[in-house]
Amino acid sequence: MITFVGIIGKRDKPLYLKTFEEDSSYTEAQLVENAFLALDIFEERVRRSTGAGGNTSTPSALSTTTHRQDFYFGVLSVLTNAVLYGFMSNTQIKFIIAVEEKLSTQQEYGQNPQGQQLLPGVTTGATSEAMVRGTLARIHAEYTKAAMNPFHLLRVEDNEPINSKRMDRAISHIVAAWPKPTASRLKTVAPL
Amino acid sequence: MTTRTKLAEDTWKRMDKINAELFILTYGSIVAQLCNEFEEYAEVNKQLDRMGYGIGTRLVEDFLARTNIGRCRDLRETADILSKVGFKIYLNITPAVTNWSADSRAFSLILDDNPLADFVELPEDGRAQDELWFSNVLCGVIRGALEMLQVQVEAQFVSDVLRGDPATELRVIFVKMIDEGQPINDE
């Protein structure tokens, strides 16, 4: 369950923050705070990669490694109930999502709310990297479409947040389309 | 009717093309800039119409050179050619011609896929939604082009999906035929 989607611009200015707290064990403020704490990781890894690539002003054989700035950052941080994943575009726009798996021991064994028997060992949390990458890529695409709005440009210069209803709706769809592990697992488990 | 569609399709194929995003962003930035400069959206609409008028008077020459279409006998034929050939070869869309008035002096063009308005969301300042016609340049183009053919019309938008309406509708109303001797009011 995705509980938070954040788009942070260059200079760490928040462009779009959306929390889905009904599914979350955190408050809205905590989700936002966690995302901002994770921003340091972006910076750190960028610095590490440009440092490792040598002096960026001299073109060299290493320039191919520093050239690609389109980063999928993977896991940014792991918290008690949530995992933060990040992606940075080559225009230095950072996308952060927080994924929470509501795992409780009652669900892993015994019965789930629908009354079907869950086999032990069938995990309810299954967040594959492909899912995360795909979701972040789609959010990136929605951001790009919103940025193409001619009336939006003015706001970016003033560093104001993105107010696009269409992007808001699209991101809500993307979040809703996040596969719910418990539901999909149920299909493969026959009721006993 | 199919000969016109075929003519349009063939002409479209021979036209030089430019990238759609470039065109859309250029037009979008014109509108955004105008909104910045003028306080009233009504004034922006007027400027877009004027720009369109300038485009239309010149575009019609290109249109006639490429298609060699003869004189239309009545407004219905004009509407048909405008939609099937005119819009097709320049914007690659074919708006539907509907809502003919009782005396056949007015019709509507329904643009169900307006390329000028891709990616656009009107600013949320409360007034743009009610006052701005984003694609108003098209009204000017139609007016200018037909005026060069001695047909005087009024063209204005009636509804726009950018405003939340179900469809984008452009109304064209025939005013009169212009006599040869009258000087064209070129703004």
Image: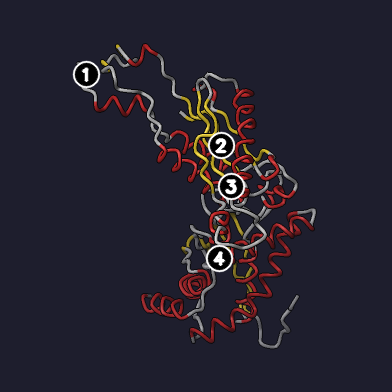
Amino acid under label 4?
Ala
The residue indicated by pointer 2 is A96
In the displayed structure image, the side of residue A103 where residue B52 appears, left or right: right
Point out the tag, 3 or 1, that comes first from the N-terminus.
Answer: 3
- Left or right: B40 in relation to A88: right
Give the foreground label among 4 and 3.
3
Q: Dividing the image into 4 quarters, which one contains the N terminus of chain A?
A: top left
- The residue that mark 1 highlights is A191
Judged from the image, the secondary structure of the residue bearing numbered disc 3 is helix
- Tell which of B162 and B70 is nearer to you: B162
In percent of the image, x 66 and y 84: which residue is there?
B179
> Badge 3 local density, few (<14 within 10 Å), some, or many (20+)?
few
Q: Chain of mark 3?
A: A
The residue identified by callout 4 is B106
**Contact check, label 4 and label 3, Cβ < 8 Å:** no
The reply to whether dot 4 and dot 1 touch (C-beta < 8 Å) is no
Viewer-side residue, A7 vs B89: A7
The chain that hosts pointer 1 is A
Question: What amino acid is at disc 1?
Answer: Pro
Look at the numbered discs 2 and 1 and tell me whether their residues touch, using CB distance below 8 Å: no
Q: Measuring 53% from the left and 60% from the top, which residue is drawn there?
A: B114
Which residue does the numbered mark 3 point to in the structure image?
A49
Host chain of mark 4? B
